[in-house]
Amino acid sequence: MSAHTVNSFDKALTLLHRLTSSRLQSRYNRHLRRAWDARMRTPFLASQAAGKFPHIEERYLALAGALIQREKELETVLDRMAQEEVVRASDCVYTLYASTGTWVYSSQGFGALTYAANAAQMQADKLRYYDIPTHIQKISRDRDQWGIEHADFNIWAQADSRTCEVIRRKNSLPLREWVKLCWKRGVNPRVYQPFLPAGYEESVGLDYFGNDGSPAQPAPIAACHQ
């Protein structure tokens, strides 16, 4: 990979990190407070200041819109460039790659722990695909009033932060392989991807235990007799 491509990725990533809405919000608050102090006799309250200085609000709404648009453009550029980046394993210390927990899958009731654990495994699958050593850390929490076990999962990668950023942005595993792994681990892929078409497994030759089979053949069309 050329130095130009690597430097371009780093440059775009640096620009994205600089574009933080919190900075713009801080500037807006300072500007609003100065305008308030110049006109009002009471202590500044952000809730009361809302709507009293439309020229300031209009200006910062426009700036916020431009900021959001620029962030989207940079995200698209980084996602595209990440596909061309070569991932190399190293002996560096482990970096936090991703986190998840049962709170994400609370709608699954007693199955929340299983779905959270599998979500962590799926993150690790992507790291393993690029030959990056990984470790999943489970942090157990108290059971709730219904006896449901709760836990957080941290996915660690033996890679630096830049490599982790590149892998996060690379394309996911092929859909068929991902669905197969879900069923092998006893979880329904539609919990993660609700729009996965019904009958997808049959169409690609998978059963509901993650085993390979033959793709389903379309039903023959009956002949029409006159």
Image (cartoon, rainbow, N blue to C red):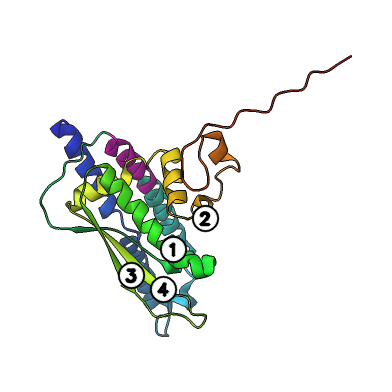
Horizontal arrangement in the rendering, residue 57 relative to residue 26 (left or right):
right
**What is the residue that sits farthest to the bottom in this orientation?**
42
**Residue 1 in view (yes/no):** yes
What kind of residue is marked 3? Arg
Tag 4 or tag 3, which sits nearer the N-term? Answer: 3
Tag 3 or tag 2, which sits nearer the N-term? Answer: 3
Q: CA distance from mark 2 to mark 4?
A: 18 Å
Tag 1 or tag 3, which sits nearer the N-term? Answer: 3
Q: Are marks 4 and 1 in contact (CB under 8 Å)?
A: no
Which disc is residue 5 wearing? none
Q: As rendered, which of 206 and 7 lies closer to the eye?
A: 206
Q: As rendered, which of 34 and 102 lies closer to the eye?
A: 102
- The answer to which quarter of the image holds residue 88 is top left
Which disc is residue 30 wearing? 3
**What is the residue that sits farthest to the top in this orientation?**
226
Q: Position of residue 47 (x, y in %)?
A: 47, 76
Q: Label 2: which residue?
A: 191
- The answer to which quarter of the image holds residue 27 is bottom left
